Image (cartoon, rainbow, N blue to C red):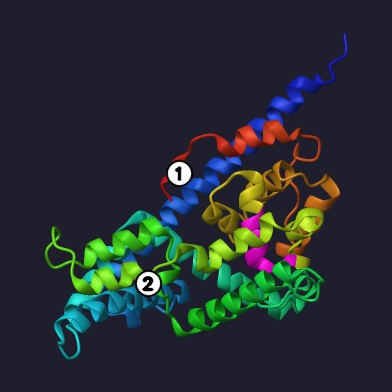
Amino acid sequence: MSDAPIAGQTDDSNAHALRDELARGDATLVRARSVLLNLLQIEGQDLFSDEVVARIRGMSLDVAAQVLAAEHDETSEAGHDPLRQDALALALVQDPAFLAHVHTLVLEAQLAERLQFRSGLDPVTPALIQDLMASGNPEKAALAMAVLAAQARFMQQYRRMELPIGELPGDLFHRALMLGRINPDVTGDGERTLRAAYDEGAGRLSLLTRLLVGLAEQADRALAVDQAGVSAFATALAYRSDQDRSLAVVSMVDRQPARLSLALRVAGLSAREVRMQLLSLHPEAAMPAGVETMPAEIAALLLSAPRASAAF
C-alpha cells in the first residue's frame, strides 16, 4: 500500500495551518491594541517615541477639541479646559471601536507613505483615479475628483495629527458626541449643530465605496495596489472578501500573509495575482501553503470564523 498522503488529508493540513496563522495574527492584533491603550493612558508621552501612539493620541485630542469647541460656541465661553479635552480624548480611545478605527487610519496612511517612498506610488492620485478623472463619464470623473480631494485632505490631516469629526463613521460620530455631553440626557445646541452638518455619505470612506461600486468593468483594477493605491485597494479588498475594512488594512500592513492571501483569493484573484500583490506589499513574504489551490468558498470560511479580533 502506498504511503503517499491522501489529497484530502493534505488539504485539511493546509487549512489547519492557515487557521492557526490567522489565530496568531488575531492574537497579535488584540495584544497590540491593548498595549496601545496602556501607552495612551500613561502621562509623560515624551517617554514614548512610537509614531503610531503619538498620532492616535493627537487625532483623538483633535476630535475631543472639536466636540468641546461646539459646546463653547453654544455657551459663548472663551477657550476650553485642557483637562476636559484630555479626559474626553482618553474616553474616546477607551472605546474599542474608536481606537480600532483611528489605529487603522494611521496604519493606512503610514503604508501609503511607505509605498510612495519605496515604489513611487502616489497616495493621492494613483493610476486608477487619474484614468477615471480623464474618462468621458462625467459622473465617474466627478466622483474620482471628489476621492482625490478627500485623499489629499486625509494625508494632510494625518501629518497634522488631525481627524475631522465629520469623517467618523456614523456610530463613532454619535459616540464621540455622547461622550462629550456634560449632562448625558441633554442635547445642547452645539451638538445639534454638529449633527445637522454631519453627512456620512460625503466622507472619504463612503466616497471610496461609491467609487468601487461604480467601477464596473474596471473593478479588478481596484485589487491591484499599484493601480488603485492603498486606500482604494483596502476598500476593494474589504468589500470583495466581506471583511471589516480595519482587518483588510491590518493584513496589508502587519505582515499577515495568510489573511491577505486568503482575502485576495476570496476576492477572486488567481494564485499568480495574489503573489503579485504580496510582492507589492511585502516583498519578503511568501504565499502560505495551500492557498494556491484552495477554493474561494473554503478561504471565505476560514476568514469568517469567529476569533478574538472580532471586537476590533
Residue 179, percent from left and from top:
23, 63
| Residue farthest to the bottom, as pictured | 78
- Residue 233 is situated, as x and y percent measured from the top left of the image, at 68, 61
Residue 48 falls in image quadrant? bottom left
In the image, residue 43 above or below residue 254: below
Q: Residue at x 43, y 60 (%)?
A: 169
Q: Residues within 10 Å of mark 1 (few under 14, many from 20)?
A: few
Viewer-nearest residue: 56 or 127: 127
Image quadrant in which you'd find residue 222:
bottom right
Residue type pointed to by label 1 = Ala
Give the residues drawn in magenta, as a range. 228-236
Q: Is residue 68 above or below residue 40?
A: below
Whether 230 is among the magenta residues is yes
Label 1 – label 2 distance at C-alpha: 31 Å
Q: Earlier in the sequence, mark 1 or mark 2?
A: 2
What residue would you read off at disc 2?
Answer: 197
Secondary element at tag 1: helix
x, y (%) of residue 160?
Answer: 46, 85
Q: In the rendered image, which quarter contains the N terminus? A: top right
Q: Nearer the viewer, mark 1 or mark 2?
A: 2
Q: Amino acid at mark 2?
A: Ala
Residue at the disc numbered 1: 310
Residue sitting at x 55%, y 62%: 206
Horizontal side, residue 106 vs residue 189: left or right:
right
Does residue 258 show up?
no
